[in-house]
Amino acid sequence: MEFIKGMDISMIKELEHSGATYRLNEKEEDLFHLLKECGTNMVRIRIWPDPYDEKGNSYGGGGNDLQTTIGIAKRTVESGMDFMLDFHYSDFWADPAKQIKPKAWRKLTGEALETAVYLHTVDTLKALKNRKLVPSMVQVGNEITKGLLWPDGYVDRSESMAGLLWAGIKGVREECPEAKIVLHLDFGTDNEMYRQWFDRIAPYRLDYDVIGMSYYPHWNGSLNKLLDNMDDISSRYDKDVLVAETSIGYTTETFGCNGIVYSKEHAEMTGYPATQEGQEAFLRDLFATVRKVKGARGIGVFYWEPAWLPVEGCTWASKSGSIYMKETETAGNAMANMALFDEKGNANSALVNMKTM
């Protein structure tokens, strides 16, 4: 299998609608063609069952419903790249801080909830297959460190969590038997947490192929710790490993965005300067680190939202999305200074030179 140089560009429909454009060597290009030209070979696409409120207002964050997902997958395949489908099993963001049941599933428990997971998985994959869009990888749950579909699938409810994961896995195996199935946790340097989680699910003999890890250097520590964890986890559980999400700042400018994440303090923590050269050095070192995993079990890296420019209207969440997540702060584009493009849409050196990594 070719080493994955992947990009999660799930925000693209909303970005383009808000006026974002992209350039390589000063020439404007379609984002998908540009990424392919720079060496990207796989795109990661998240999917939410119903990311709208009762009035039909989008929650924002890309609005990744089925039709949006189909559109991104179509452009990906037409550009000569594969894709990984990322099932959140929530109507909006799913991560260790929140795993909210989809609205239509709120009253479901037990086998009824498992059936809903199975049918959503199957229906989504059938819709893609009917358009000759077949994912090469499928992520069952997103950053499920603390479980999924709370409260039923809390991590300490191991049997229930495993049942929900099995429901998704069953749907993938039936519809896309060749696809590699990924289970994805956050904090890729925390070896103890990974051991505890995968030991917890071991008795349920889940049928999966790859362990995905989020790795953000400003939050998760050194590349050496990432490598140590990847070496141990891939060997201990006999699975391939990949970095399912990563990013780093090329500047500490905020571009007037609300809630910007990457700061001077973060840059100091990573050891990489907040410049295009620093971003490129990090990505080169990260690719090399994953390639070093023993037994060639490190299979690739996905960069998270490399095209999320600081354009007006593209935020973590709309007003409706914030209400859904029960958040009171106004959502902003918190990742604009961690993109692989500058604020005007020109490809950064990390992307331009990725073919050499």
Image: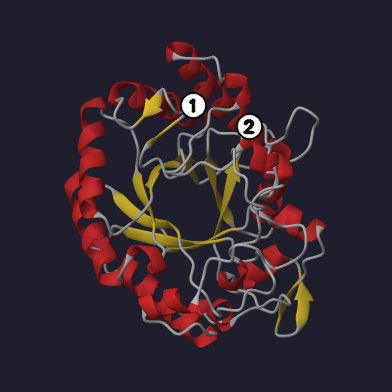
Residue 83 left/right relative to 288: right
* Quadrant in which residue 183 is drawn: top left
**Residue ID for mark 2:** 49
2 vs 1, front mark: 2
Q: Secondary structure under badge 2?
A: loop
Residue 118 left/right relative to 218: right
* x, y percent for residue 205: 26, 29
Q: Is residue 69 above or below residue 36?
A: above
Q: Are marks 2 and 1 in contact (CB under 8 Å)?
A: no
* x, y percent for residue 268: 39, 80
User: For residue 275, which numbered disc appears in the image?
Assistant: none
* x, y percent for residue 4: 45, 61
Whichever of labels 2 and 1 marks the residue nearer the N terminus, that label is 2
Q: CA distance from mark 2 to mark 1?
A: 15 Å
Say few, some or many: other residues with alpha carbon within 10 Å of mark 2 (under 14 / 14 to 19 / 20 or more): many
Residue 199 left/right relative to 333: left
User: For residue 171, which numbered disc appears in the image?
Assistant: 1
Q: Quadrant of the C terminus?
A: bottom left
User: What amino acid type is highlighted by mark number 2?
Assistant: Pro
Can residue 132 be seen in the rendering of this structure?
A: no
Q: Is residue 220 above or below residue 356?
A: above
User: What amino acid type is highlighted by mark number 1?
Assistant: Gly
Closest to the observer, 5 or 350: 350
What residue appears at the point 62 percent right and 57 percent down from the top-left corner?
Answer: 9
Q: Secondary structure under badge 1?
A: helix
* x, y percent for residue 238: 22, 46
